Image (tube, helix red, strand yellow):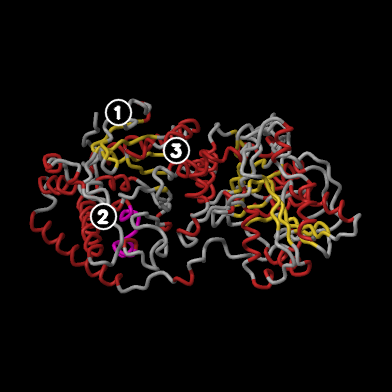
Amino acid sequence: MPASQDAASIPRERRVAFLEQMLLSRECDRRSGIVLRQGQAWFHISSAGHEGLGALCELLGPEDLIFPHYRDRTLMLARGMDAEGQARDVMAKGGSHSAGRNMSSHFSHPQGNVFSLASPTGSQCLPAVGAAWAGMLRGRDNVVVCSIGDASTRQGEFFEAVAFAIERKLPVIFLVSDNRYGISTPTDGMSPLRLGLLPDAVTTVVDGSDPDAVHAAAADVLPGVRRGEGPAVLWCVLDRLDSHTSSDDHRLYRSSEELDAMRDPVEIFTGRLAQEGLIDDEWTERTRARLARDVEETFDRVAGEPTGDPTAVMDHLFAEPTVPDAAEARTRPCGGTIVEAVNRALRTGLERHPELILFGEDIDDPKGGVFGFTKGLGELAGERMSNSPLAEATIVGTAVGLAAVGMRPVVELQFVDFAGPAWNQIASQLTTLRWRTASAWRCPAVIYAPWGGYLPGGGIWHSQSNESLFTHLPGLRVIVPSTPEDTEAAFLESFESDDPTLILLPKHLMRRQNRPQQDTAPVHGARLLCSGADVTVATWGNGTELATEAAATLRAEGIGVEVIDLRWLAPLDRETVAASLRRTGRLVVVQEDNKTSSFGASVLAELLGGDDEFYSLLAPPRLVTRDDVHIPFHPDLESAVLPAADDVVAAIRSVLA
């Protein structure tokens, strides 16, 4: 049953101020609609009908966090995003929280501990529980509020977040706005609440149109959540008074009788305060008129502010580069295996960085991960290393939340082939957070995963490379190391970086014993594997083995092959390859991924787009690659589709012919 008003309703001394906040929210909505019709804005999402949820903020402290919903205008006002901030948001001004980069009503307000909202519905849930986990690890008693619409609770990530919060007893309140519609689709027959899918022990149904009921329900659950007793779901039933967005007209799919029966929280609370003698009609009229004047003046003034600078649109994709410490600026000889290098780097990271967290499937001792990367680190890590559920979205999504609030999450995916369930978090949250907030929020998370083929018995779902999927995402650093030295250096550097990093570890090479490198190399950029004057071969990962073998074969014939291990795919060290191409006049790119839309094809396009490089060519360049086919399970079939050293030799002979 819905919670009713009781002694825990909004205190008397705050009631008039809260009503004024609701009225201000409604006026900001009204004015936003006006500037939209005037052509000064492009999109608007109304919060009308959702104002009562702002009562929750009456119980929150400044250290508590909010992961908002796009109808949370009143919550934003309560956390300090005033009418001026609301105006800049709807008109996408350069001084807005996103510098005009994020859609309007996709709120963010770091000063009030409000995280930046992304469009994919429900994608804020897993970062929210990650932030809550960070608070628990730090011994703090702050609460995280994850606000979401009822239609979005059918997203799998909502269920993953609730499950993780219950599993770890995290201090999270899931604030659900149930207006019974997902755009035009009624949700009564499909919401988790009405299907009986939410645990009764953590769920409270609330009259969301009544601010006192919202306050009372929150006051009831908040102390237990804050004490570490686990999460709560406040399911708030209310009415969406306006159409879904400015691009919608709800009169097309809702009857006039239904629209007339809707409950308005502003009118409900206004009437209640009048009955209590706290306000009268004169106060209401005077306050509405004053807010209308103030908001109009504010919006008019903001309308004259500049938009974001188009010449600066590339800014904030990555952090400003820093000068590395001289001792860490170059890789150090270490030898051994890549697995040992990963383990050694993770141990160093745990020792150097108290905020570093290790999280992934089966990584805890005694197993230490399916490849043994974390074996033996349990005693040193303590609670900073733990097994995740079998849920890649949870692994990456919690890492986003951990990183956003200052932790250093380092998470393992058992195979990069299984990144699919985490794709929403990688593409929507991890790689866009810095850019969409103009560096107000950052996400220095590290993801590492075994990668690639040439390990018999992998088949379709254990032998993929697919690096082009990740290099396609602006804001993500991607490296494929092929030696223990480069592997250890990549991890250690990524622990210091302010940007997200993906480290792809070639399975075929990771257990191979290596002698210590005789030469050192910078941590960033490409590495020269062997010199030659006749042809340039650019490659990475398992391709380094094919290229060096081909170079050795042709060296006996007097052909000089310059092999370059790109290592870092994003950012790409273009100049090293371009300089070699200008010397040799010939280029071969070697990859194991399939050819269409691949990273190797991108490298060719990047180099051929430069006049100096194009006019240096003595022959058409070649791409040694897998055809557009999946990798089969049987070793003989796998060998048939993956490139071999002989293919590299043939390509080199072709450009020399």
Depth check, mark 3 against mark 2: the one in front is 2
Identify the secondary structure beneath mark 1.
loop
**Residue 192: percent from the left, percent from the top?**
34, 31
N-terminal of the two: label 3 or label 2? 3
Identify the secondary structure beneath mark 3.
helix
N-terminal of the two: label 1 or label 3? 3
N-terminal of the two: label 1 or label 2? 1
Q: Nearer the viewer, residue 519 or 232?
A: 519
Q: Which residue matches tag 1?
A: 194
The residues bearing labels 1 and 2 have C-alpha atoms spaced at a distance of 29 Å
Q: Residues within 10 Å of mark 2 (few under 14, many from 20)?
A: some
Magenta region: which residues? 76-88
**Which amino acid does the dot numbered 3 rest on?**
Glu
Q: Quadrant of the C terminus?
A: bottom right
Residues marked 1 and 2 touching at CB (< 8 Å): no
Q: Which residue: 25% across, 61% down? A: 32
Q: Quadrant of the N terminus?
A: top left
Q: Is residue 500 left or right of residue 365?
A: left
**Which amino acid does the dot numbered 1 rest on?**
Arg
Q: How crowded is mark 1: few (under 14 residues within 10 Å), some or many (20 or more)?
A: few
**Residue 86: percent from the left, percent from the top?**
31, 61
Q: Which residue matches tag 2?
A: 246
**Residue 166: percent from the left, percent from the top?**
45, 31
Verify whether residue 84 appears in magenta: yes
**Which amino acid does the dot numbered 2 rest on?**
Ser
Q: Which residue matches tag 3?
A: 157
Q: In this view, does 66 lie to the left or right of 412?
A: left
Verify whether residue 393 appears in magenta: no
Is residue 484 something one can see in this rendering? no
